[in-house]
Structures are given as C-alpha cells and as structure tokens.
Image: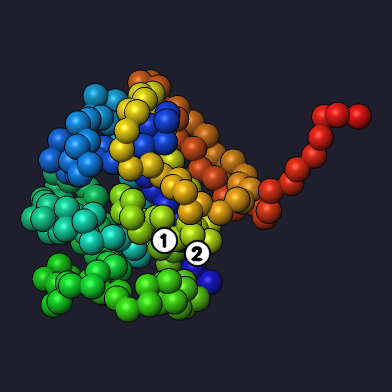
Amino acid sequence: MRKIIVLTFVSLDGVMQAPGGPEEDPSGGFRYGGWTYHYFDEFLGKEMMNQMNRPFDALLGRKTYDIFASYWPHANPDDEPLAGIINRARKYVVSKTLVNPSWENTVVINGDVVSEIQRIKNTDGPDLQVSGSSNLIQTLLKADLIDEFWLKIFPVTLGTGKRLFGEGTRPAAFRLEKCEFSPKGVIIASYVRDGEIKTGSFVK
C-alpha cells in the first residue's frame, strides 16, 4: 500500500492559504498571499529538494494543479531543478471538469473521489505527495487517508485564511519523525500516524 504524504507550508496559527504570492488564492478576501517569501533561503530549498528528490506520484486538487501546470512544464530544469522531477512524476488531479489535460503524465480523478483515491493508494507504486490543495486535504482528513505530514512551519500568524486542519479533521495521534529549523526560523517537521489518541489524567 502506498502512503499519502501531505507537504505543506503552514503559519503558526494553522493557515496554509496562498503561501507563494498575492494572486495565488485571494478567495475569501485573503490579503497576505506570499507570506513565505521572505523566509526562503538555501537551507529550506535544500530540504524541499531532499523531500521531493525521491520516487513519488503527485495527488493534487484542481486549483493547485492549474497553478503548477501553468508554470512547471515551461520551467528550465537547468534553472529550476524541481522542474524535471515534477514534470516526470504522474499527477493525479481531482476535478469534475478537467478533460484531456495537456500536462504530461496527468490522470484525472472524478466521480467517487474517496473510493478512487483509496483504490490508487492500495496499488503498487511510489508514495503519493499532496502539495497545496487545501480543499482536497480536508477530504483526505475526513476519510482518514493521510499517513504523514511533512510541514514547514513559518514564524508568522495570519489570523484568517484556509487552515490545514478544518472542522472535519478526525482525532488521531502522530509521531515526530524528524525536526530541523532554518536560519530564518522555519521549522521543518515530519509527523507519521501513530494510532489512536491515548488519554489519561493527572488527578490521582
């Protein structure tokens, strides 16, 4: 069985909306698009390359897919090392309207999305990496399909915006697998599912 791994940028107060630029996702009147920009450095870039420089298939929501498809097929691999990696990877995109996608290695998921993703998860192949795709992540959380979170936690609070963990999140325990921090204060933390929540009491 393949793992579903969520790779995402998140603020201290849990917001993941529009980390890359003002026009990325201004829905809901979000005014802070591009909030990760001033925290990027060589250390963070190297960590991202390490995480993606392994066999994977991408699992994407339609908005994130469109953003990626408008950029990566046209990027020069000599200038953007991730371009070759992302372009070669199989891209599963959840969409009710996308027909005949032009980006190579794209597979459209429609109909019963949860059942189809579960079917793909049960096949042989590389792990499925989810980047961006906040709406899709909520679907995966409700269906309890996420195995790992690879988070980049930025030292900002945004107050409003789409949050990584929405109201449909199921209670679950996780184990910290790896944790580092960049010179600019970004925490890179990887969490793996670790069964159910264990409760107790300090009252004797």
The structure's colour scheme is rainbow
Q: Residue at x 49, y 68 (%)?
A: 2
Q: Is residue 15 found left or right of 197 in the rendered image?
A: left
**Foreground of the two, 188 or 117:** 117
User: Is residue 50 in view?
Assistant: no
Disc sitting over residue 176 in the figure = none
Disc 1, SS? helix
Position of the C terminus, as image quadrant, is: top right
User: Is residue 67 in view?
Assistant: yes
- Residue 67 image position (x, y, % from top left): 17, 53
- Residue 43 image position (x, y, % from top left): 35, 30
Estimate how packed mark 1 is, as few (under 14), some (14 to 19) or many (20 or more) residues with alpha carbons within 10 Å: some
Q: Amino acid at mark 1?
A: Thr
Disc 2, SS? loop
Estimate how packed mark 2 is, as few (under 14), some (14 to 19) or many (20 or more) residues with alpha carbons within 10 Å: some
Q: Amino acid at mark 2?
A: Ala
Q: Is residue 151 found left or right of 65 in the rendered image?
A: right
The quadrant in which residue 37 appears is top left
Q: Residue at x 49, y 38 (%)?
A: 189
- Residue 164 image position (x, y, % from top left): 41, 44
Position of residue 155 relative to residue 161, above or below, is above
Q: Residue furthest right?
A: 204
Disc sitting over residue 139 in the figure = 1
Q: Do the residues under discs 1 and 2 have CB atoms within 8 angstroms?
A: yes
Q: Is residue 161 found left or right of 5 in the rendered image?
A: left
Q: Residue at x 23, y 73 (%)?
A: 96
Q: CA distance from mark 1 to mark 2?
A: 6 Å
- Residue 101 image position (x, y, % from top left): 14, 72
**Foreground of the two, 174 or 96:** 96
Q: Residue at x 44, y 76 (%)?
A: 115
Identify the residue under disc 2.
143
